[in-house]
Image (cartoon, rainbow, N blue to C red):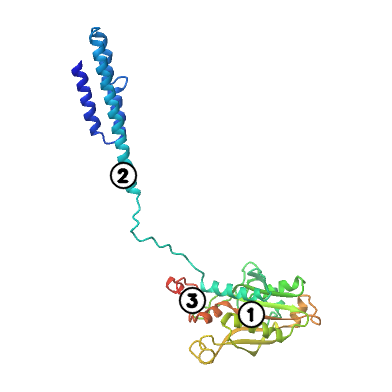
Amino acid sequence: MKQKLSQIKDLAMESLNKAEELKDIDELKVRFLGKKGELTKILKGMSSLSAEQRPEIGKLANEVRSAIEDKLAEAKNNLMQKEQQIKLKAESIDVTMPGRINCIGHKHPMTIVIDNIKDIFIGMGYEIAQGPEVETAYYNFEALNIPENHPARDEQDTFYIKSAADLLLRTQTSPVQVRVMQQGKLPIKIIAPGRVYRADEVDATHSPIFHQLEGLVIDKGITMGDLKGALAVFAKELFGENTKVRFRPHHFPFTEPSAEMDASCFACGGKGCRVCKDSGWIEVLGCGMVHPKVLEMAGIDSEIYSGFAFGMGLERVTMQKYSITDLRLLFENDIKFLNQF
């Protein structure tokens, strides 16, 4: 029996030294120390021993059990440390490797210009007004002194809603001005930015979808001088402190008198260059005093109140500010182009 115990001990030690996984340790524990294990079988056979042999064999069996338990604990601890080292190595970070660059986006040039213009007018006391992009012909034309047979309608050929002949995609943000005037809350000092639509072919200077920003001021005693002063401040804030402006007579059905405003070329300072086509001036916007008929149609007494309005194409302003020569670059999402801003 002594020889058998010695063999069990040697076999257990050898098996535990070869164990490669923690599950192997558990299996060996059951094999040698379990209820049906090798050592348990030996202990069950002690009843056949004489009274003199039992203490000696019992002591030896306990020594073998203790040795196997110690070896089990040692082997288990070694395997756990080994697995931890493997896991740490797999999860380790090489601090000498270059970091990953996260591509962070930035504002589109159109958004930069729109936000800039909004900030300028908000700083001058204007509020932002908005309205629907699907409009009625009344708000888009008639309320702006453009009757049904007026030639201006041909110039602003647009997209009509097929299910309703009176509905169309707005050609300008001017209907927002009419809606604000009809609310009857005077005085009025607003800007109305937003998308507008016209049936234009896409090319370097045209698009069927573009953006406008229009402004409206109505109060007692408003004059053309107020209009010129406000727009001169706007031009200096947008294009630079040394910017000069000039006003050329023009015609718009909803303003009288009307004018086009030019700004001195920000690229050459008015000397003449490729950007301004050697004229020294860049056309920026249209403006004028609100036509009395437009005021009356909105329920405002034109004998007491007067006002001015202006409007600009935001794509055009963006192209002028950044010397962009092709409108399509603003919506084609070319990363090489957008990264410049």
Q: Residues within 10 Å of mark 2 (few under 14, many from 20)?
A: few
Inspect the image, locate mark 1, and give the three-letter code of the amino acid beneath it.
Gly
Inspect the image, locate mark 3, and give the three-letter code of the amino acid beneath it.
Arg
Q: In the image, which disc is placed on residue 130?
A: none
Q: Residues within 10 Å of mark 3 (few under 14, many from 20)?
A: some
Residue drawn at x 27%, y 29% is 71
Among the two numbered marks 2 and 3 on one chain, the one whose residue lies closer to the N terminus? 2
Circle 1 residue: 311
Q: Nearer the viewer, mark 2 or mark 3?
A: 2
Give the quadrant of the N terminus: top left
Residue drawn at x 22%, y 22% is 8
Residue 191 seen in the current view: yes
Inspect the image, locate mark 2, and give the three-letter code of the amino acid beneath it.
Ile
In the rendered image, the vertical position of residue 302 relative to residue 281, given as above or below: above
Query: Contact, CB < 8 Å: mark 2 with mark 1?
Result: no
Tell me which corner region of the image, top left, top right, bottom left or bottom right, holds residue 313.
bottom right
What x and y, as percent, mark residue 216?
69, 77
Viewer-closest of 46 and 159: 46
What x and y, as percent, mark residue 118?
62, 73
Circle 2 residue: 86
Circle 3 residue: 328
